[in-house]
Image (spheres, grey):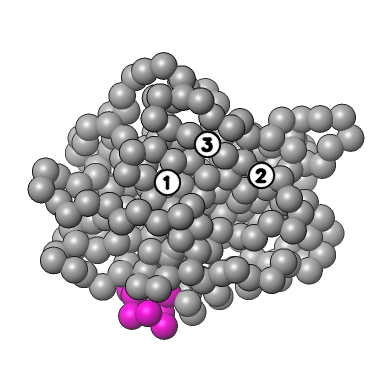
Amino acid sequence: MSSRDGPGVRPPGWRGWVTVSATALVVTGLVVGVWIATSGSPASSPAGMPTIVAPTGAPSVTVPSPTSQPDAGPARAVMVFADSEVEPPDVTRVATVDVAGSWPLGACGPVDVDQDRVDFVSGTERGPEYARDLAMGWYVDEAAADRAYTGLRTRIEACASTTGATVETAASGLGSAGVLATVAQPSIGGWSEVSIYALSRLGGVVALAVDHASFSDATVPGPAEATTTRAHAERLLAEVCRVQPARC
């Protein structure tokens, strides 16, 4: 799947996507995430998860992800967004390098800046009826990164559960530690707003990919089905290994 793909596509007549800010988390009063890409026409996948046939078109005007600069930290060297394909003209991407930046937890945030963080990059991708948040944080050592990872995971699960959302988590096998989580807002008219998280840690680096989509109640995906979100987390970890091979 491309960076525009997402796990949810609504059929004709569905009630439409909920629009929130890039950091808005969609669970009643809670949005830990981003809108998942649904630009294009739907097609069914063997696993029952819709896939997207993305439209073709001229490149969009975007704010590129940080690029390598002399003496810059790793956050400026990684490519937050995949750049292997031409984006349609109605897709924009914004990336920000800021060591004091906030993890994109929407209504569950803001959270205090992690202790012992040394670098941070976050990015939001927006298109018609979707958005996606990606973030990576570097820490002074593995213990500090593990504290940040554990704090984020705990906050996601606790914040979601207090709103009556259904939370399902599973070990992801990503990096040194990882979890995939599906958080579904209580159904309205047979449709649920679903946030899908892939949170991972590789040594002293923590990565987060968050997607959001609207699903019919019968098709709300479990964590094991969150293949697109997982793929983005895997790509972020691959960027760590590309930029800092010694970590991998």
Mark 3: few/some/many CA within 10 Å (<14, 14-19, 20+):
many
**Which quarter of the figure has residue 130?**
top left
Residue at 76 percent of width and 54 percent of height: 99
At x 46%, y 20%, the residue is 59
Q: Classify 216 as above or below 230.
A: below
Precedes in sequence: disc 1 or disc 3: 3
Residue wearing tag 1: 131
In the image, what residue type sits under mark 2? Thr
Report the amino acid beneath label 3.
Answer: Arg
Give the x, y percent position of residue 172: 50, 57
Q: Could you tell me which quadrant the C terminus lies in?
A: top right
The residue at the point 69 percent across, 57 percent down is 101
Name the residue at the top extreme: 58
Tell me if residue 147 comes above or below residue 3 in the rendering.
below
Residue under label 2, please give it: 96
Question: Residue 165 lies in magenta, yes or no?
Answer: yes
